[in-house]
């Protein structure tokens, strides 16, 4: 069983590499961003509130994130493992993640982080914005997302680093090159 979280700033390639990892290891994928966008697409009142937060580049509440995660895990099989993408995003979510795995009596492999220079992140987000219809895929909101990442999410890296559960690979190059680096990290353990 392999439980882990892909980590990195906006545009680092978490979603892209998640697809390859879930295919190789048969993992259950939990992308909190995708789930929030699904709620927005449903047109619900909750979706409208989420849209306001995401369009400003800010983080939605920990309570909402945890309730989505718990509901999803209760409704879906995940016996080969869980791959989180976009979670945990602050220190309180990091603690909630550990509580969750304790409760489930499951091991947590750790955080796999994708390192990509800022200019490349911005170029990827602006490029995707041409077709993605994501309200947060533009330079102004990118700056806000990156600020949130640096202030609230980066401390999560140090938190797991102290526990020996933080691993970084370079997130530039071809999709296959990056994937190979991740697989190497997972399998050398
Ligand atoms: P989320 O959806 O998680 O967005 P993000 O973290 O900002 O990251 P992205 O999805 O934009 O990028 P990615 O790293 O997945 O990269 P991708 O593979 O798409 O969160 C959105 C919002 O939801 C947050 O801002 C927040 O408001 C809210 N939220 C979500 N989770 C939350 C939580 N836990 N708590 C509170 N709020 C939460 O790649 C990006 C682009 O680059 C793509 O076009 C891709 O094709 C391209 N690309 C990928 N790899 C490469 C490569 N190697 N070379 C060239 N291009 C590449
Ligand atoms: Mg993503």
Image (tube, rainbow, N blue to C red):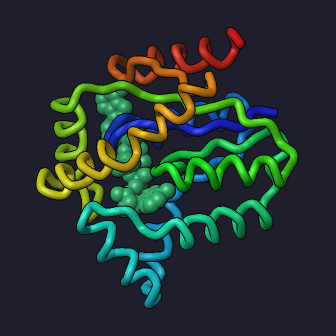
- Looking at the picture, how far across and down is residue 66, in whole percent? 61, 65
- Looking at the picture, how far across and down is residue 137, in whole percent? 23, 55
Say whether residue 33 is visible.
Answer: no
Residue 22 versus residue 162 in the image, above or below:
below
* Quarter of the view holding residue 21: top right
* Quarter of the view holding residue 120: top left
Residue at the location (52% across, 14% down)?
181
Residue 157 versus residue 186 in the image, above or below:
below
- Looking at the picture, how far across and down is residue 176, in whole percent? 47, 19
**Residue at the limit of the structure toward the bottom, as seen here:** 45
Residue at the location (45% across, 14% down)?
177
Indicate the quadrant containing the N terminus: top left, top right, bottom left or bottom right: top right
Say whether residue 134 is visible.
Answer: yes
- Looking at the picture, how far across and down is residue 117, in whole percent? 24, 26
Residue at the location (66% across, 35% down)?
23
Total numbered labels: 0
Residue 35 falls left or right of residue 30: left
Indicate the quadrant containing the C terminus: top left, top right, bottom left or bottom right: top right
Residue 44 falls left or right of residue 106: left
Residue 32 versus residue 51 in the image, above or below:
above
């Amino acid at each position: 069983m392999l439980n882990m979280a892909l980590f990195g700033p906006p545009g680092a390639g978490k979603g892209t590499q998640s697809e390859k990892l879930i295919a190789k290891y048969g993992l259950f994928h939990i992308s909190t961003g995708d789930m929030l966008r699904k709620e927005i697409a449903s047109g619900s009142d909750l979706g409208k509130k989420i849209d306001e937060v995401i369009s400003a580049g800010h983080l939605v509440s920990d309570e909402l994130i945890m309730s989505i995660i718990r509901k999803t895990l209760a409704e879906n099989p995940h016996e080969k493992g869980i791959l989180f993408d976009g979670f945990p995003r602050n220190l309180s979510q990091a603690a909630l993640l550990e509580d969750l795995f304790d409760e489930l009596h499951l091991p947590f492999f750790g955080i796999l982080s994708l390192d990509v220079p800022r200019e490349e992140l911005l170029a990827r987000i602006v490029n995707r914005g041409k077709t993605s219809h994501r309200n947060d895929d533009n330079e102004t909101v990118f700056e806000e997302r990156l600020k949130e990442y640096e202030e609230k999410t980066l401390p999560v890296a140090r938190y797991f680093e102290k526990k020996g559960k933080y691993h970084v690979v370079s997130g530039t190059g071809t999709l296959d090159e990056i994937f190979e680096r991740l697989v190497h990290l997972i399998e050398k353990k």
